[in-house]
Image (cartoon, coloured by chain):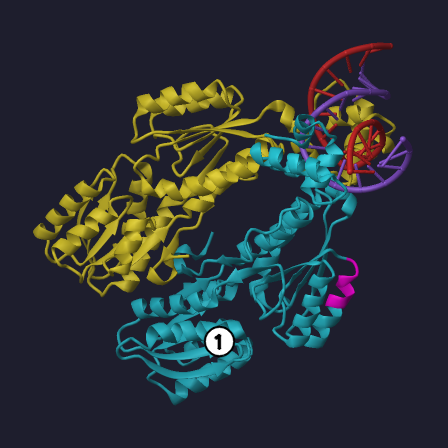
Chain colours: A cyan, B yellow, C red, D purple
Amino acid sequence: MVTIKQIAELCGVSRGTVDRVLNNRGNVKPEKRQLVLETAKKLNYQPNPAGKALAARKKNPVVGVLIASEGVPFFDDVLLPMRKAALKYENYGMKVLWRSMRGFNVEEQCSIIDELASEVNALIINPVNEPRVIEKLNDLVARGIFVVTINNDVDSCRRHCYVGTDYLQGGRTAGALLKMIAPPGIHAGVLMGSQSMQGHRQRLQGFLEVLEKTEGFQLMGVHENEDDDMISYEKTRQLLEEHPDTNALFIISSGAYGAARAVMAKNRRDIVMVVFDTIPSTIRMMRDHIIQAAIYQHPRQQGRRAMQVVFDYLVNGFRPDQKKYLMRNEIRILENVEE
Amino acid sequence: MVTIKQIAELCGVSRGTVDRVLNNRGNVKPEKRQLVLETAKKLNYQPNPAGKALAARKKNPVVGVLIASEGVPFFDDVLLPMRKAALKYENYGMKVLWRSMRGFNVEEQCSIIDELASEVNALIINPVNEPRVIEKLNDLVARGIFVVTINNDVDSCRRHCYVGTDYLQGGRTAGALLKMIAPPGIHAGVLMGSQSMQGHRQRLQGFLEVLEKTEGFQLMGVHENEDDDMISYEKTRQLLEEHPDTNALFIISSGAYGAARAVMAKNRRDIVMVVFDTIPSTIRMMRDHIIQAAIYQHPRQQGRRAMQVVFDYLVNGFRPDQKKYLMRNEIRILENVEE
DNA sequence: TTGAAAGCGGTACCAC
DNA sequence: GTGGTACCGCTTTCAA
């Protein structure tokens, strides 16, 4: 392992000079600069993160977290490991400010961002896909704040990093799975949160892409449930009444429980249900054999990873090595859904 | 964040004394000891891992890795992220000695362990489940070497930590999946590496546990392929000739490619194949629709995690918070198998 | 433009 | 028993 001290000795300069070169702080004579750079390269110098972390304490690293998590069980699985990771990183001197909100209110999100912006050097956010929010995030980036979007990426935003899933692939996986586990002649109904959610549209697109090539496939309707179980219940009930030949349901975001209750109410245990996320109510419905499979988007990894990317940047001085960290869309059935 | 220095000031003692108390190095008057402990507890003192890591350099932390990986594609997926993690940790001053072997030769494994034992303070090993090896590992533990078993745990071994999967659950998941994707009346043939591999037996057990309750299920035979594709090919061919009504194949460890080739040779594309691990040859067979699904045991996480557990112990001074780190058995189909 | 020195938190060793 | 001190690697500040 090579240290700054060794490079300094080899080049006949002081550690301070080496530091100035390696971190582009200027004020070094070109020849010396050149010499230091070459030596560092030749010896394959890699900074020791422990040294960096200790020194970084003086920079007072603070990260803000803003997630529209209230009333959304999925985010419990994101936030728990994120909190655990935060606890670990707080031992290095990093601080975390937690904020949450309910629903996708642009106004509210903007004002919380403003509030956080003045006291953090990094932000983890689950952003609403709206121009005003995007503009605000770009603004933070311009001011030197490190921005990580989680679970939901936004268009044309200059955020440093996105942590989430590939929605299109998620839809394809769900479609292909349904095709495998349902009898031929699939007549599927679809429920999604909202057409205005880009991720939901992409999942639907991937799903249809796979199934439309399938013999006997019929789409019985696509309905919006605003990620609400009650609305989900009503719409599913209606769908089943209008199209009794429906034999499969695909739930694109939340509302699986509501849909499952409608299936139970109609006593339609022949229906195959594929949903997203393995929240507790979904696991219960899997045990009752109402829901057959769920696509798992690694919420825990998402939470951990987002916090880690920020820590590595603020404390260890690493820029993320990817602009996007995409988690796999996994298939979970009753047998591998629990710990 | 609380530091040793602060505790020292509050207690009116020196940092050295606080260190002696918190690390049980003795030589502290009971009253002082008590006071320091109470203060640390009250302030919820947590050591800063960066400080520890820096100081740990003087201990010269070295870890040895010994995996019977040669000729086993599965371990490529374990070793690559393990190497990447090692590279990262080497920047903290930890050193890694890499060893590999081919097959499960007790003699050879023992001699490599002996060779490593004298130069490492930790060992990551994929052990052969044999008394002589187990004894040797227990010996290392007694000598203060930190031992992590990976992918294959061994009975009654005092290793500090196991990183791998739950074999029984893997078998159950495979069985339940087969039940979902194959038409009713499953006539399944099974290929396993060896009856003497505990993990393989457990997967078979989980598989049968689920399927034996299934109407119309028949087991057409269980054959050993020694994890070899050629043997796998021969045994599968034979099985299909003796039992032409076989309509499903379950491959418990390696040899999926050999079995798939036999299926192709017999032109039996109606057969449903469920296998373990998504090695390149398996992915190719999935693209050709010979293999329908694979159980994925998170090889990459296994590699990363094992290295991390060792690093956290040697460099940060954390004991692992679990004796077993079990990865989920995931279901992979063509649509979610690739990046 | 540069070097020297202090400090981040923890550990180890020496002198008393 | 105990305090003082040096050191691990990196950053920052100050003086020259």
The one nearer the camera, B11 or B100, is: B100
| Callout 1: SS | helix
Residue C13 % position (x, y): 72, 15
Tell me if residue B112 can be seen.
yes
The one nearer the camera, B128 or B79, is: B79
Q: Identify the image quadrant of residue B156.
A: top left
* Mark 1 Cα shell of 10 Å, populated few (<14), some (14-19), many (≥20): some
Chain to which the residue tagged by mark 1 belongs: A
Q: Which quadrant of the figure contains the N terminus of chain B?
A: top right
Q: Is residue C16 left or right of residue A29?
A: right
Above or below, B303 against A233 in this view is above
Residues rendered magenta in the picture: A113-119
Residue B130 % position (x, y): 33, 26
Above or below, A14 against A267 in this view is above
Above or below, A250 against A35 in this view is below
Tag 1: amino acid: Arg
Above or below, B159 against A306 in this view is above
**Residue ID at (22%, 46%):** B191
The one nearer the camera, B169 or B215, is: B169
**Residue ID at (42%, 57%):** B339
**Residue ID at (64%, 39%):** A49
Residue A326 % position (x, y): 50, 58
Secondary structure mostly seen in magenta is helix
Q: Is residue B175 left or right of residue A112?
A: left
**Residue ID at (86%, 32%):** B9
Q: Is residue B13 left or right of residue A143?
A: right
Q: Is residue A112 left or right of residue B121?
A: right
Q: Badge 1 is on which residue? A: A201
Tell me if residue A270 can be seen.
no
Q: Is residue B27 magenta?
A: no
